Amino acid sequence: MAAITLTGLKKSYGNAHVIKGVDIAIEDGEFCVFVGPSGCGKSTLLRMIAGLEDITDGTLDIGGRVVNDLPPKDRGVAMVFQSYAIFPHMTVRENVAFGLTIAGDDKATKDAKVAEAARILQMEHLLDRRPSQLSGGQRQRVAIGRAIVRKPQVFLFDEPLSNLDAALRMDMRMEIGKLHKALGATMVYVTHDQVEAMTLADKIVVLKDGLVQQIGSPMDLYHNPANEFVAGFLGAPSMNFLEVEVVSANGDKAVVRNAALDPVEVPVRVGSAQPGQRARLGIRPQYLAPTPDTEPGQLHGTVMLTERLGSETVVEVQLRDKTPLIAALTRDAVFALGTPVNLGFDPAMTHLFAD
Amino acid sequence: MATISADNHGLRLATRYAVLVLIAIVFIFPLVFMLMSSLKPDQQLLQDTASLRAFLPVGDVSLRNYTAAFDRAPVALFIFNSVLVTGVTVVLSLLVCSMAAFAFVFIGWKGRDFLLTVILATLIVPFETIAIPLLLIASKLPWIGMDGLTWGWLNSYHVQIVPFIADGLTIFLFVQYFKDLPGELIEAARVEGATWPQIYRRIVMPLAGPVLATAAILKFLAMYNQYLWPLMVVQQEGYRPVMVGLQYFFQQNVAWGEVMAYLSMITVPVLAFYLYLQRAFIASIASTGVKG
C-alpha cells in the first residue's frame, strides 16, 4: 500500500496549460476522489499518476518513490477505465489474468488469484465468456477484477460508472465502496458526479481549470466550501446564490438584504463584508422551509414549478427580484402554481461570499 | 397496407438480386470463357467467340491444350516460383508493415509524423520511375546465402522479394486500422505491465484480422501479377515467375488455346488464396465482437 504526494504538478500541451501546479497529499489506504466539471483536468491528473501522460513539471511520489520518469508498469498502479478497456479477443479469465500472464506467473498461481478475484466480485460464472457476451455492469466487474488480481499499491478509477444506467451505477458505487473497505488499498477516483464523490470519498479534491479549488472530507467541503464554485458544485440540487447588499457588518457577521429578502444577519464565510458592498448569499435548497409571513429574515416569491420526487418535493420559486430559487421541501409540501410563498431559513447555515 | 409493403419488399429484393446477378455475370463470364476456351482447339475457339458457345463446353473438347502448355513451358516451375516469391513477400510484408504502423500509431517518438508523411508520399511514385535505379542498386548489393558472400542480386528469389516487403500502401492500411483501435486497450495493457512487443503480439495483432486479410489480398495480387521487375532482374528460367512465363506463348503464332490453358492454371492459386482469406476475413470480423 502507498501514499501518493503530488507537489507542484504541472501539465502543458504546447501553450495549453492543463494542470497549473497542483499539490495533493493522499494518505495510505485513503479513498480520494477528484471531482470537477468537464475539462477541469481531473482525468489528466489521474493519467499522470498512472504514467500515461508525461509530467511537465513538479514531482509525483508514490509509496516514497519519485515516479515522474517511471513507465506505468513500474509504478505499482492498476487502472479501471471509463470504457472498461477489456480485451475483446480474450475470455474473462484471460482478461483478469492478463497482468499475471505478462508478469510470467505459472498457471496454478494465476488460476488461484483469478478465482479469488472472481469470488470477491461474484463473477465465477462469467470466467469463460467473452466480453461481447457480457452486460455493461459485468464488463465493469471484469475491469475491476483485472485491477485487483495483481494486488497493486494504488487503484486508479477514471469515471468507471459513467457508462452504466442509474440503478446499476448505484449498485456498483456501493460495491466499489465495499471493495475499498475490504482491500484497504489507496484509491484515486475521478468523476464529474458529485454524488459519487460525496458517497465514496474519504477525501475530495475539487478541481477547476487545472487548479485545486479545495481539498477536504465530503462533509467538510459541503458545510465549509472555500468558494462559490465548491459551494455550487457539491450538493444536489445545487446551492442557490442571491445577489445581496450588505447593510451593516460586524466582524464575521453581516446584515444583508435585497428586494426579495428581509434584512437578516448571516455569518461571513469568505472575504470581509463592508456596508454598501454587493455580495452573494448561498443557501442550500434543503435548508429552506415555508414559514408564516410574520417571522423575520424571509425570502418572498411565487411558486413556478413543483417536482414531487416522493421523498421530497423540489419547488422552483421566482423571487420578487425575478431571480429563480430552488427549495427542497418535505414530501407533503403542496403548492399550486402561482401561489405566493414565504421561505425561511437558519441564517447560521448560509454562506456569504463577500470577496 | 401490409400487402403493399410486402410487394414493395419483394420488388426491392428482386431488383437487388437482378443487379447482383448482373455484376456477378460481368465478373464470372471472363473466367468461364477462359476455362471453356482452354478446352478447345484454336480454330473452334476463335469461331465460338461470335456466339454464346464461347461460354459452353461444346464441340471438340479435350485437355490437349494443357499437355501442350506443359510441353512449351515449365508451368509447374513458374507457378512454384510465383507462389514462393508471393507467399514469402506477403508474410514478411504483413510482419514488417504492421510493426512499422504500430510504431507510428502507438509509440511517441521525434520525427514520426514527418517520416510517415514521407512514406505516404511514396504512394504517388509509380514503380516504373524507380525501376531502373532500383535495378542498378540491386545489381550491386551483397548477399550472404548458401554460397557464402556474393555480389549482385540478379537471378535470385530474394531480388524479387526484398524490395517489396515494406511498402507505403500496406503501412497506410495498418496505420488507418490501428488508429481506430480504442486507445484505452493499449493504455490498459501498458498499466498491466505489458511491453511494446507484448502489446503488439497479444493485443494489437489478435485484433487486426480484417486489416491483415485486406493487406494480404492486395499484396498477394500485386506480387503474383509482377511482370516488369522480374523481367528486368531474372534472366534464368529457374527463378522466372508465371507472368513472365506468359511470353512463351506469344511467339510467332499465338496458340490461344494454350494461352487459355496456361492462364487457367496460373489463376488457380489466386482463387484458392482469395477464397481462403475470404473465410478468414469473415471469421475474424465475427470473432472480434467489439461492442460499445
Image (cartoon, coloured by chain):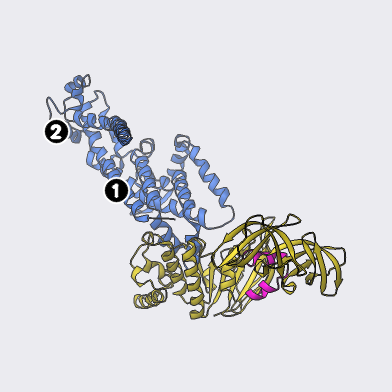
Chain colours: A yellow, B blue
Q: Earlier in the sequence, mark 1 or mark 2?
A: 2
Residue, disc 1:
B279
Verify whether residue A96 appears in magenta: no
Marked residue chain, label 1: B
Establish if B117 lies above or below A192: above
Left or right of B195 in this view: B269 = left
The amino acid on which the numbered mark 2 sits, given as a three-letter code, is: Leu
Circle 2 Cα neighbour tier, 10 Å, few/some/many (<14 / 14–19 / ≥20): few
Q: Which mark is residue B63?
A: 2
| Residue A8 in sight | no
Q: Position of residue A166 (x, y in %)?
A: 49, 63
SS label for mark 1: helix
Residue B232 picture quarter: top left
Marked residue chain, label 2: B
Q: Quadrant of the C terminus of chain A?
A: bottom right
Establish if B292 lies above or below A211: above
Question: Mark 1 to mark 2: distance in Å?
Answer: 31 Å
Circle 1 Cα neighbour tier, 10 Å, few/some/many (<14 / 14–19 / ≥20): few
At 55% from the left and 49% from the top, the residue drawn is B115
| Residue A275 in sight | yes
Q: Quadrant of the N terminus of chain A?
A: bottom right
Verify whether residue A223 appears in magenta: yes
Left or right of A220 in this view: B228 = left
Nearest the eye: A169 or B23 = A169
SS label for mark 2: loop
Nearest the eye: A122 or A242 = A242
